[in-house]
Image (spheres, rainbow, N blue to C red):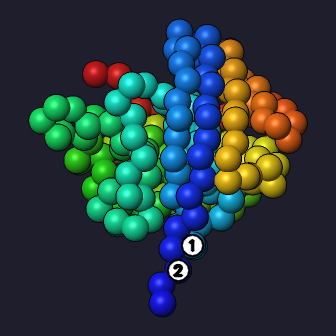
Amino acid sequence: MALRATIHKVELHISDADRNYYASHSLTLAKHPSETDERMMARVIAFSLQAQDNLFFSKGLSDTDEPDIWVKDLTDAIQLWIEIGQPEERRILKACGRSDQVIVFCYGGHTSKIWWQGIQHKVARAQNLQVIALPKEGIETLGKWVERGMTMHVNVQDGEMLISTEQGQINLIPELWHQAKEN
């Protein structure tokens, strides 16, 4: 019998002074059996940094033709494609061809640096690609705080994040490794 996804409910309160975005989201996350708590929390952090009304979690790990998070317009065209982790360059380039904007959020510390050094020249032609590294230690801490029902407060200001849960609070400073070209 196949293992089923574990459902997590997150009340996410975002105060993003950098983007003038202030909203609350009631998220239901299906954590795939092969997904770690750290990866799930990286998805929540990526959602927080890109939050908007039409941002949704996709089938993710269950469907290889979909990103982890996306924005689609009314015609079903993909406006924003968000990948979590260290995707292959082929997948990144395919996403760049299918979407207006692609953001990769990696969170593996040194292994992410090695991954990026190995593919950065192969994806350099992608004009709509952005790569952001989330600090490994911070994501590991958030992974330890995972509960089936959580309330998170995320404050973003000057590129820094203050994340508070019932378990405590932590500062994260995402690093921009690759910036999309301006049109």
Residue at which label 1 appears: 33
Circle 2 packing at 10 Å, graded few (<14), some (14-19), many (20+), is few
- Residue drawn at (78%, 35%) of the image: 165
- Which is nearer the eye, 143 or 89? 143
Circle 1 packing at 10 Å, graded few (<14), some (14-19), many (20+), is few
- Residue drawn at (62%, 56%) of the image: 39
Q: CA distance from mark 2 to mark 1?
A: 6 Å
Which circle, 2 or 1, is nearer the viewer?
A: 2
Q: Is residue 78 left or right of residue 12?
A: left
Q: Could you tell me which quadrant the C terminus lies in?
A: top left
Q: Is residue 130 left or right of residue 90?
A: right
Q: Residue lying farthest left?
A: 75
Q: Amino acid at mark 1?
A: Pro
Q: Which x, y percent locates residue 108?
A: 68, 57
- Which is nearer the eye, 24 or 84? 24
Q: Which x, y percent locates residue 72?
A: 26, 37
Q: Are marks 2 and 1 in contact (CB under 8 Å)?
A: yes
Residue at which label 2 appears: 3
Whether residue 49 is visible: yes
- Residue drawn at (52%, 30%) of the image: 25
Q: Which x, y percent locates residue 55?
A: 39, 34
SS under mark 1: loop
Q: Amino acid at mark 2?
A: Leu
- Which is nearer the eye, 93 or 123? 93
Of pointers 2 and 1, the one earlier in the residue sequence: 2
Q: Is residue 134 left or right of residue 68?
A: right
Q: Residue lying farthest bottom?
A: 1
SS under mark 2: loop
Q: Quadrant of residue 24?
A: top right
- Picture layout, residue 20 above or below residue 106: above
- Residue drawn at (74%, 52%) of the image: 146
